[in-house]
Image: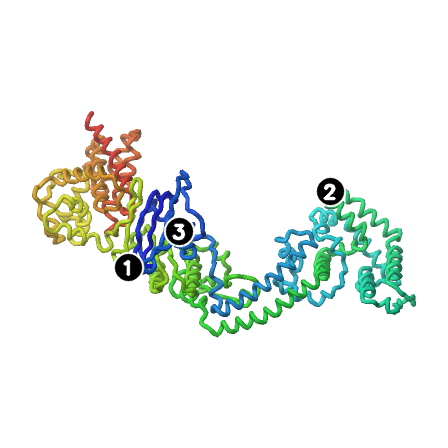
Amino acid sequence: MEKLVVDLENCYGICKLEYEFDFSRQNGCLIYASNGTMKTSFAKTFLDISNSDMPSDRIYGRPTTANIQKMDNGTLLTIEPEDIFVIESFKDEFNFEKISRLLVNNELKNKYDRLFNDIQKAKDRLIKKMASLSKLRQADVEEKFIEDFKDYDDSFLDILISLEDKIDGNIEIPVKDIRYKVIFDDRVINFIKNDEIFNSIDEYSAKYSELIDKSAIFEKNVFTHNNAITVGKDLDKNGFFKAKHQVTLKTGTLIKSKIELEKLIDEEKEDILSDDRLKELFEKIDSGLDRNNEAREFKRIIGNYPEIIPELNDIPKFKQSIWISIFNTEKEIFSGLIGIYKNGKDDIEEIIREAKDEESSWRAVIELFNKRFFVPFKVNLINQEDVVLKDKVKPTVEFIYGDDTEEKCMNKDELLGILSNGEKKALYLLNVIYEIEARKLDGNPVLIILDDIADSFDYQNKYAIVEYLNDILKEDFFKLIILTHNFDFYRTVHSRLNIPRDNCHMVLKEPNEIKIVPGQYLNSAFNFWKRQLNGNIANNHKRTLIAAIPFVRNLIEYVDGKDSNDYKLLTDLLHIKENSASRRLSDLQRIYTDVWNANFRIDDDDTIFDLIFHEAESIIGENIDGINLENKITLSIAIRLIAEDYMISKISDTDAISEIRSYQTRNLYKLFKEENNIDPIISTLEQVNLMTPENIHMNSFMYEPILDMSDNHLKNLYNEIKEANDARNST
């Protein structure tokens, strides 16, 4: 991809944006966008397109345009969803479409996919039958089954293997009539747990066992009524009786046909169930089962199959027996799944052995993360065999949390409960790296949109991110658009990754359009100002002259201290002092030349205050919410001066004013509030007191805070305080 052509309209917060990103010189483009301009809306738009969705205007519902094209070999083509990968600033959960690619190499992974798909199809077929015979929801079957066999402490498929020797086609319980969902309904179970009913079932079970022991045919846990019926059917089905064979019972009775055997079994069963005490207990159990539909259905079942009542004495065991009978009913499907799983399991284990002999990509990702990122935990991949064999789609990792004295293994949920936001984001970033490395293996061209990926990180981890971005940029099939509202990160990425100035952009938000303009202040703003000031001061550089006042004042403080006369003179220009209004441009010319070696000429030796207020009014008249540092500092200085002038005029205690030696704006505000606590301008003065110090002093040579601030916010503040001051002067 040589270029990306973007034409957006009414896409989330983007009213209109047209721009052409050029990747011909560098694989990355860098965008600085202060909060509220377009950054998140831009990322959301591309995220929608990557998901084959259409972006929208969620507030006003205006018609949306989202035309995004890529230029390959001079030809413009519509970008496809699979060409885009959006990395959001942070997500609690992350869907890894390609993470399984990191398990093994491409050839082995394809083989694994074929094996897994065959196993999954056979498993789905068995679960469908289990749902049909149990009357459970298909989505609930696996969870219920594993819960009923929790003593096996294994996966669904491995439990099936453990049960294999019990699946012989012998259906002990007629599960087509005795439904799991009915028998083990919560209301039925609660009925059974009733002390009186439970005691009756217990006595019934003991009496039933006693009668079975006396039976001429049946034997408890060896040869039951259902076993006998199955034997008769199997013998008849296989032509045993037609071949004139006979069955001799232990009593000496000869059985010559299936009909004779079934008749004898029914008579023996009837003899047992007609026992007076057994019938009495049955009636006691049966009489309580008319309360609701589920209980009445259960009543019907035990009415037809009273021999299951003893099974109710051990519900967990009975549940397992029901499942085993279901598998015996569908023995062919069960055996098919077991066969496919066993064969696949051996092949998968061979895949794992081969994979361990290679330099696996997931291992490289973990090593990269552990080496570069500074967090209180290390990541380790465990049980790759289980990863594949237990139907998971991504490697299972453990987290080793610790300090210099102790370490503890944790799972992801435990770890998230103790991490800071920055550390949680580092964990999220690990997932992002997995995804990028998987796409790297694919080798397909991808446009990566990064939305404030370094936000909330400390400096060490920010540099780790920059280092990883540098790795990505070396791959020609990756093209990056890096979005950030952090100006320090913006400058760092530009310098460390050697992104050309032409590929560094800033965002301007106009009333009806978002504009992407060339990046500014990529190097030191102060060197840029000095170059502007050399020579004659043209009109468009007068704001630079004003904006440099706090910077040069700081230089003097660091070199000569606050007792310097020049330091005091420049301080006069940032506050209303006795001599402030009389200071002239020639004073700045002398100081800038002496301290900063900035050689400039002035044509008119106006007062500096006149220049400040003239330029502030010019800025107010400009209709662009820009990122111009000089404008914002100039406007902030003007706001403070007007605010101080207003407060001084309203404070009657002039002696208290004269005693202020530092933090003048803040201390004036305290005095003003004591005398004028109902003045409606107080809230505006609070904003002046909070905002302008950061803007004017630029956080000791750091100017990110003021760049992030909207011009319109400062303009509104200026107009409010000026209106109050003008009203005061007119009275």
Q: Secondary structure at mark 2?
A: loop
Type of amino acid under label 3? Phe
Q: Position of residue 635 (x, y in %)?
A: 22, 41
Q: Can residue 277 be seen here?
A: yes
Q: Quadrant of the C terminus?
A: top left
Q: Quadrant of the N terminus?
A: bottom left
**Residue depicted at x 30% and y 50%:** 19
| Quadrant in the rendering for residue 65 | top left
- Tell me which label, 3 or 1, sits earlier in the chain: 3
Q: Mark 1: give few (<14), some (14-19) or many (20+) Cα within 10 Å.
A: some
Q: Which mark is residue 292?
A: 2
Circle 1 is placed at which residue position?
499
Q: Mark 2: give few (<14), some (14-19) or many (20+) Cα within 10 Å.
A: few
Type of amino acid under label 2? Asn
Q: Mark 3: give few (<14), some (14-19) or many (20+) Cα within 10 Å.
A: many
Q: Position of residue 404 (x, y in %)?
A: 42, 65
| Quadrant in the rendering for residue 332 | bottom right
- Tell me which label, 3 or 2, sits earlier in the chain: 3
Mark 2 and mark 1: Cα distance apart in space: 74 Å
Q: Position of residue 499 (x, y in %)?
A: 28, 59
